[in-house]
Image (tube, rainbow, N blue to C red):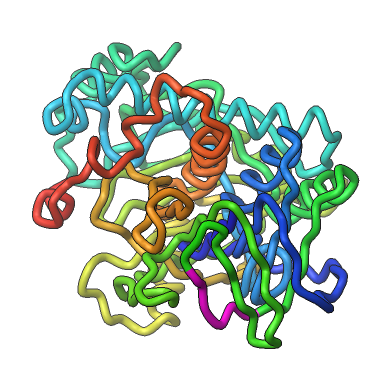
């Protein structure tokens, strides 16, 4: 099995991995050491499969920098909108699967004792300035119908001096440090006999079974199943949509001045915030991020300045800038699909797509769905992630 996870790269880590010196035959070969690929590899290894991970860059992917990693059962689109476009059953399944993804990552952290700053906390969804979101109560009702426990409409988030007013509170969300999580996951996978090789470029993929990956060094890796994040055409990755950019800035704040929580603002583009501790006595960093709106061609420096100004208007206690990071997002036209069969060999090729919105939740979910597809298990919400069941035309996707 081969899994490629390139929809959004995580902060690269310098952890050394063994060199690939010869070809091999395995049950599971994973192309891409991102979150979806590594979780799929870990879970399939625990199920007794022989697993190999191949990554072109370092563990975590090619894109270095900082990732504002949060996990949320509050999905990218309002539950009221999902109800109206996909039906109540789809909204319920979306909520169940997102919550299962958060639970699954937490279970891995506890089982393997991975020190990655995992923490459960509240999430607050706010309306932007001038945004007449009269449907807050309507959205709260839709979220409750979808099965989100404890969601409530409150007068304001617990942020002193903030400009926000009424908002929705989602309990039991989470955040974590993705690089440290991946390092711990890699150690756990290797203890179980799995193999990870970084710095490996895939030259071509040959249909099977078995599926074969041929590296640029000429090594041939044969596997029973291939999973990739990009469609395969003629044994190579087909072109994907041009990526959009996500920008993040980190501003130092006095310790304890901002409640530890996740914050989302329903502006265009959507913006988000969370806290990161810098150790005892070092204060905390408020991470603020946003995606470029479609068609935006502003210079990255301008996007940083605009994001900083917005963050300071929402959190007056913010001090100096200590971090900046820009990453890529490839937004696929499918609203839900994160794991599906590909067309290089329909019985042995899977795709992990849709790494936008809340990519940490989607990446975890992709790993879970891939594991169950390969193992023949049944998930009550798996059909939502098959393209036959959830394809949304590109025009409709833009409207969503």
Q: Is residue 283 left or right of residue 247?
A: right
Please tell me in which quadrant of the rendered image residue 287 appears. bottom right
x, y percent for residue 289: 47, 58
- In the drawing, does residue 151 fall left or right of residue 400? right
| Residue 199 part of the magenta-drawn span | no
Name, please, the residue furthest toward the right.
191
Residue 52 vs residue 184, the one in the foreground: 52
Residue 227 in sight: yes
| Vertical side of 66 occupied by 1: above or below | above
The structure residue drawn at horizontal position 68% and vertical position 85%, both measured from the top left corner, is: 218
* Residue at x 57%, y 59% (from the top left corner): 210
Q: Which residues are magenta?
A: 201-206
Is residue 204 part of the magenta span, yes or no? yes
Q: How many marks?
A: 0
Picture quadrant of residue 15: bottom right
Which residue is nearer to you in this view: 287 or 183?
A: 183
Residue 387's place in the image compared with 172, above or below, is below
Judge whether residue 308 can be spotted in this image. Answer: no
Question: Which residue is at a point 34% across and 59% down the rendered structure image?
Answer: 343
Of residue 323 and residue 379, the one placed in the foreground of this image is 379
108 vs 367: above or below: above
**With respect to residue 29, does 262 lie above or below?**
above
Q: 236 or 62: nearer the eye?
A: 236
């Amino acid at each position: 099995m081969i899994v490629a996870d390139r929809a959004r790269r995580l902060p690269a880590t310098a952890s050394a991995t063994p060199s690939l010196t010869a070809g091999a035959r395995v049950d599971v070969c994973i192309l891409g050491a991102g979150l979806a690929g590594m979780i799929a590899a870990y879970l399939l290894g625990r199920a007794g499969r022989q697993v190999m991970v191949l990554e072109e860059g370092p563990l975590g992917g090619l894109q270095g920098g900082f990732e504002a990693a949060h996990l949320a059962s509050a999905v990218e689109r309002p539950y009221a909108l999902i109800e109206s476009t996909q039906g109540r059953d789809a909204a319920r399944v979306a909520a169940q699967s997102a919550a299962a993804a958060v639970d699954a990552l937490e279970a891995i952290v506890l089982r393997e004792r991975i020190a990655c700053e995992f923490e459960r906390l509240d999430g607050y969804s706010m309306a932007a300035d001038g945004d007449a979101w009269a449907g807050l109560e309507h959205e709260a009702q839709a979220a409750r119908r979808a099965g989100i426990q404890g969601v409530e409409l409150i007068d304001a988030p617990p942020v002193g001096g903030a400009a926000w007013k009424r908002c929705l509170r989602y309990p039991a969300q989470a955040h974590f440090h993705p690089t440290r999580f991946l390092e711990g996951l890699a150690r756990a996978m290797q203890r179980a006999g799995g193999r990870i090789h970084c710095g490996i470029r895939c030259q071509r993929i040959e249909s099977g079974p078995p599926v074969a990956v041929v590296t640029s060094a000429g090594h041939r890796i044969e596997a029973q199943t291939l999973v990739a994040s990009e469609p395969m055409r003629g044994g190579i990755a087909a072109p994907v949509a041009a990526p959009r950019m996500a920008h993040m800035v980190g501003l130092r704040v006095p310790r304890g001045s901002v409640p530890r929580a996740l914050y989302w603002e329903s502006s265009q583009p959507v913006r988000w915030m969370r806290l990161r501790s810098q150790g005892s006595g070092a204060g905390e960093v408020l991470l603020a991020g946003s995606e470029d709106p479609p068609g935006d061609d502003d210079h990255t420096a301008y996007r940083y300045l605009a994001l900083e100004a917005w963050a300071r208007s929402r959190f007056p206690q913010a001090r100096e800038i200590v971090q900046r990071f820009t990453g890529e997002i490839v937004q696929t036209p499918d609203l839900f699909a994160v794991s599906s069969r590909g067309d290089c060999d329909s019985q042995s090729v899977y795709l992990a797509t849709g790494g936008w919105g809340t990519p940490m939740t989607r990446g975890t979910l992709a790993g879970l769905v891939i594991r169950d597809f390969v193992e023949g298990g049944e998930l009550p919400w798996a059909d939502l992630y098959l393209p036959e069941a959830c394809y949304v035309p590109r025009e409709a996707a833009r409207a969503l």
